[in-house]
Amino acid sequence: MARVTASAYTSHVPAIGAALDHGRTHEPYWQKVFGGYEFSKDWLQANRPDVVFLVYNDHANAFSLEIIPTFAIGTAAEFAIADEGWGPRPVPKVIGHPELAAHIAQSVIQEDFDLTIVNRMDVDHGLTVPLSLLCGQPQAWPFRVIPFAVNVVQYPVPSGRRCFQLGQAIRRAVESYDEPLRVQVWGTGGMSHQLQGPRAGLINREWDNRFLDRLIADPAGLAQLPHIEYVREAGSEGIELVMWLIARGAMGDVAGGPAPRVAHRFYHVPASNTAVGHLILENAN
Ligand code: DHB
Ligand code: FE
């Protein structure tokens, strides 16, 4: 059977992608960011997944305000690269896993989570920056990716509680797939940042670090936080952090297994206008 072997969490700041693509990673400003991912690249080589179930949010590249799915699963064989701002990044296209994606859709929808099935979807920095941070700049991505887009842009957005429950259903779906695949679930976005209005530039180190502590040790409690707390404490775009609860819900301890091992933890301010957070948790299988 397939297994969820680990989960990884990271910010997806678009300026990080631009720094990589324009060869600026060795500048002192960016070294402090990329330095936090050196361990992760080695770790990923040593703990190579077959498939990454990558939870991210689209920034009006695949979905405009005309159609806003709350949870969208990418079931296509491949996904083209798109972006606003700096434009589409010069990175490899993303190869999907239609069979596993269809199985997860079947299982999770049967468990009453109403996913939108997307057979064609371009992917933006929300998905490509995490891939670059953990894989570097390969000719082709070294594993298949199931893109899972969550609406955290247009209210009403899903609650942390709903995301955490969905992660648990995704784990059950993966573990009922009849092929011995190693699957990682990644949660992306965050940490504290606000890109608009009078509070633009807001960063809250203390809150971010408490979020990381609780994500590790008290995810069920953390899942109870209301939206207003994310927005008040972590800024309007800090709401992206609810996506991390999907990945956390997919870990074995939530289903009664042993606590995960913290393989890596990193926090840094600033990257562009945001705080950068990153965590890797391994399931004790
Ligand atoms: C920026 C955009 C994002 O989507 C994000 O998550 C963080 C920062 C930006 O434009 O700086
Ligand atoms: Fe974002």
Image (cartoon, rainbow, N blue to C red):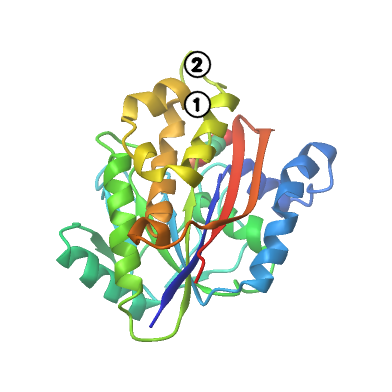
Q: Report the residue at 53% width, 39% height from top.
A: 212
**Callouts 2 and 1 close, C-beta under 8 Å:** yes
Q: Earlier in the sequence, mark 2 or mark 1?
A: 1
Give the CA separation, mark 2 to mark 1. Answer: 7 Å
- Would residue 62 be visible to someone looking at this image? no
Residue lying farthest to the top in this orientation: 198
Q: Report the residue at 49% width, 35% height from top.
A: 211
**Residue 268: x percent and y percent?**
68, 36
- Quadrant where the N terminus sits is bottom left
Seen in the picture, residue 272 relative to 73 is either above or below; the reply is: above
Q: Classify the position of ligand 1 by quadrant: top left, top right, bottom left or bottom right.
A: top right
**Residue 152: x percent and y percent?**
36, 40
Q: Amino acid at mark 1?
A: Gln
> CB at mark 2 closer than 8 A to ligand 1?
no
**Residue 174: x percent and y percent?**
35, 72
From the viewer's perspective, is 13 left or right of 163? right
Q: Report the residue at 39% width, 41% height from top.
A: 242
User: How crowded is the residue under tag 2: few (<14 C-alpha within 10 Å), some, or many (20+)?
Assistant: few
- Would residue 7 be visible to someone looking at this image? yes
Label number found at residue 199: 2
Q: Secondary structure at mark 2?
A: loop
Q: Nearer the viewer, residue 74 or 230?
A: 230
From the viewer's perspective, is 97 left or right of 137? left
Seen in the picture, residue 113 relative to 242 is either above or below; the reply is: below
Label number found at residue 138: none
Residue 106 position by quadrant: bottom left
Label number found at residue 194: 1
Q: Secondary structure at mark 1?
A: loop
**Residue 130: x percent and y percent?**
57, 54
> CB at mark 1 closer than 8 A to ligand 1?
no
User: How crowded is the residue under tag 1: few (<14 C-alpha within 10 Å), some, or many (20+)?
Assistant: many
